[in-house]
Image: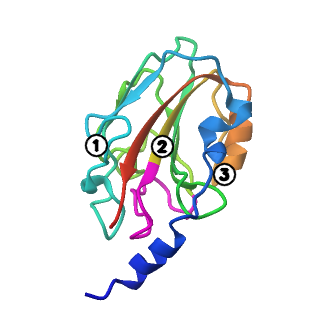
Amino acid sequence: MIPSFERVFGRLLRPIRGHDADLLCNDPRLAVAAGTMQLTSPAFAEGGDIPSRYAGRGVGENVSPPLAWSGVPAETVELVLVMQDPDAPLPRPVTHLIATDIAVDSEGVEEGMLRPETNPQIAFLPGSLGRIGYEGPRPIRGHGPHRYVFQLFALARVLPALDDVMLPELASGMAGWVLARAVLTGIFELI
């Protein structure tokens, strides 16, 4: 059997990975003391495999997984959720989701609710590929396991209107206002 071009290409790129330092949760401007916030999913455990149902186009159903959170500080006025892949063979992590204006009294999101058409109460900003809303895992076949890092931030202020803002501008707007943060990492690989 002849391996696919994508698989061969993925194997050649396997040693090339992004950097954890460039994840939004590692931005020194967003540092906070150890908080009490928790971020979990009933679909996968911390460090566990993300089910293929939640994988991106052409691989899975591209449905966002259910997420649950707790321990949001009482003084929080806005929640922000970001999902990034730090293992992509690029200079910076690929951003698969930016969701802002999440209600502070919410305790999570149900499966499939991280898209503008299914949840108009949340504001969505474009990810790395310019797509709005959740874009599931879709690593290069043969590149090895990729980590998908869901990052939840509790803010002490409401972000200004952020139409078509990208991640660097979002981070600047959040700087100095993060009360707590939580991280959930899932793994996905295409062999």
Q: Which of marks 3 and 1 is nearer the N terminus?
A: 1
Q: Quick one: quadrant of the N terminus?
A: bottom left
Q: How crowded is mark 2: few (under 14 residues within 10 Å), some or many (20 or more)?
A: many
Q: Nearer the viewer, mark 3 or mark 1?
A: 1
Q: What stretch is highlighted in magenta?
A: 128-147
Judge depth for marks 2 and 1 and give the one in front: 2
Q: Is residue 150 left or right of residue 65?
A: right
User: At 46% across and 28% down in the image, what residue appears?
Assistant: 103
**In the image, is residue 61 above or below residue 182?**
below
Q: Report the residue marked by disc 3.
A: 165
Q: What element carries label 2?
A: strand
Image x and y of residue 58, in percent: 32, 71
Specify the farthest residue to the top: 74
Q: Which mark is residue 111?
A: 1
Residue at figure coordinates x 65%, y 21% from the top left? 32
User: Spatial distance from mark 2 to mark 1, Cα to Cα?
Assistant: 17 Å
